[in-house]
Image (cartoon, rainbow, N blue to C red):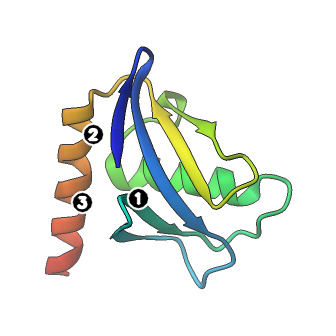
């Protein structure tokens, strides 16, 4: 789900557009599953996914970039200021908090 690159940590995701609301659903097939309310037109779903990751994980949007998958549901996001371990911990913490709600 998370790999390393020279620029930072890479997060592999599966994004489903046109959902009822934005949410991180969990892990599926070694990808973080995201649902976003935006349609997949004019990169709206890509922007919504980036914003969702930023808000949920507490990472500034300026540190997250769409690395791969501009027109695909399978997307890879680059986190420039995060290590693999740090990003993994933030995702784990978020998912654990979601289970307790």
Front tag of 3 and 1: 1
Distance of label 3 from label 1 (alpha carbons): 15 Å
Identify the residue at horizontal 72%, vertical 46% (top origin).
Answer: 70
Q: Is residue 83 above or below residue 93?
A: above
Q: Secondary structure at mark 2?
A: helix
Q: Are marks 2 and 1 in contact (CB under 8 Å)?
A: no
Farthest-out residue, top = 6
Q: Which residue is mark 3?
A: 94
Q: Which residue is mark 1?
A: 31
Tell me where residue 44 appears, x and y as whole percent.
Answer: 75, 57
Q: Is residue 81 above or below residue 68?
A: above
Residue 92 marker: none
Quadrant in which residue 42 is drawn: bottom right
- Mark 3 surroundings: few (<14), some (14-19) or many (≥20) residues within 10 A: some
Identify the residue at horizontal 42%, vertical 43% (top origin).
Answer: 11
Q: Is 78 on the left-hand or right-hand side of 86?
A: right
Residue 87 marker: 2
Distance of label 2 from label 3 (alpha carbons): 11 Å
């Amino acid at each position: 789900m998370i790999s390393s690159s020279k620029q930072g940590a890479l997060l592999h995701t599966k994004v489903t557009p046109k959902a009822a609301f934005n949410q991180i659903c969990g892990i599926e097939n070694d990808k973080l599953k995201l649902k976003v309310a935006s349609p997949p037109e004019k990169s709206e779903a890509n922007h919504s996914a980036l914003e969702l990751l930023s808000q949920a994980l507490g990472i500034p949007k300026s540190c997250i970039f769409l690395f791969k998958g501009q027109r695909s549901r399978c997307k890879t996001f680059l986190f420039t200021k995060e290590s693999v371990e740090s990003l993994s911990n933030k995702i784990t913490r978020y998912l654990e908090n979601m289970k307790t709600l």
